[in-house]
């Protein structure tokens, strides 16, 4: 497997993976990603900012996608709770993580997160933050298994309530 930055040529496959994830979330009665987000425009912006990534399998086919940035996340400024590392310190953020349905539960999300952990470690950045829907137990289980700690509640720009987690990178 290989993690690489996405290009505009990857958008169709990224959107297919995201749309499958939307269907999966809806099947679990989770209203996350059910309001038109994330959409093609959002993914294009991620790509143009060099913040969109894909995972290629051994056949060089895209099987997963994620957004990763070192820019501060505006919705993380206000939290009902407390971040572990001060908001004023540099940190990484992950959004829009999705795995092609036939590859779910095969360690790809763990691979992606560990790649981002290593990138932060290489840059001496001590924090990676992520948020997820309160009913998205699959994501909560994954990030807790990888050592993320629950920090509180944030609200998205779409006014969605999300559980916020942080991992201290050491």
Image: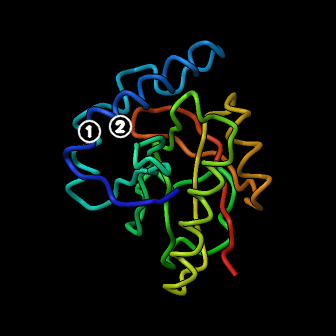
Location of residue 118 by image quarter: bottom right
Residues at circles 2 and 1 in contact by the CB criterion of under 8 Å: yes
Marking on residue 11? 1
Question: In x, y percent, where is residue 65?
Answer: 44, 45
Quadrant (top left/top right/bottom left/bottom right) for the C terminus: bottom right
Residue 13 visible in the shown view: yes
Q: Alpha-carbon distance for marks 2 and 1? A: 5 Å
Question: In x, y percent, where is residue 49?
Answer: 24, 60
As rendered, which of 40 and 64 lies closer to the eye?
A: 64
| Residue in the picture at 51% in, 17% down | 23
Q: Is residue 48 above or below residue 120?
A: above
Number of marks in picture: 2
Marking on residue 165? none
According to the picture, the residue beneath numbered tag 2 turns out to be: 14
Question: In x, y percent, where is residue 168?
Answer: 68, 73
Q: Secondary structure at mark 2?
A: helix
Q: How would you rate the neighbour count of disc 1 (Cα within 10 Å): few for under 14, some for 14-19, many for 20 or more? A: some
Q: Is residue 9 above or below residue 23?
A: below
Q: Is residue 62 above or below residue 31?
A: below
Q: How would you rate the neighbour count of disc 2 (Cα within 10 Å): few for under 14, some for 14-19, many for 20 or more? A: many
| Residue in the picture at 53% in, 38% down | 99
As rendered, which of 115 and 67 lies closer to the eye?
A: 115
């Amino acid at each position: 497997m290989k993690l690489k930055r996405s290009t505009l040529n990857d958008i169709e496959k990224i959107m297919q993976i995201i749309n499958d994830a939307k269907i999966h979330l809806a099947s679990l009665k989770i209203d996350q990603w059910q309001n038109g987000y994330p959409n093609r425009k959002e993914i294009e912006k991620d790509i143009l900012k060099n913040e969109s990534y894909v995972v290629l399998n051994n056949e060089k086919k895209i099987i997963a996608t994620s957004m990763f940035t070192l820019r501060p996340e505006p919705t993380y400024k206000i939290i009902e709770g407390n971040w572990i590392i001060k908001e004023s310190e540099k940190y990484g953020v992950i959004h829009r993580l999705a795995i092609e349905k036939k590859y779910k539960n095969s360690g790809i999300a763990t691979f992606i997160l560990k790649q981002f952990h290593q990138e932060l470690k290489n840059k001496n950045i001590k924090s990676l933050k992520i948020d997820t829907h309160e009913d998205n137990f699959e994501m909560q289980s994954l990030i807790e298994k990888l050592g993320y700690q629950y920090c509180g509640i944030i609200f998205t720009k779409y006014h969605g309530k999300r559980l916020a987690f942080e991992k201290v990178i050491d």
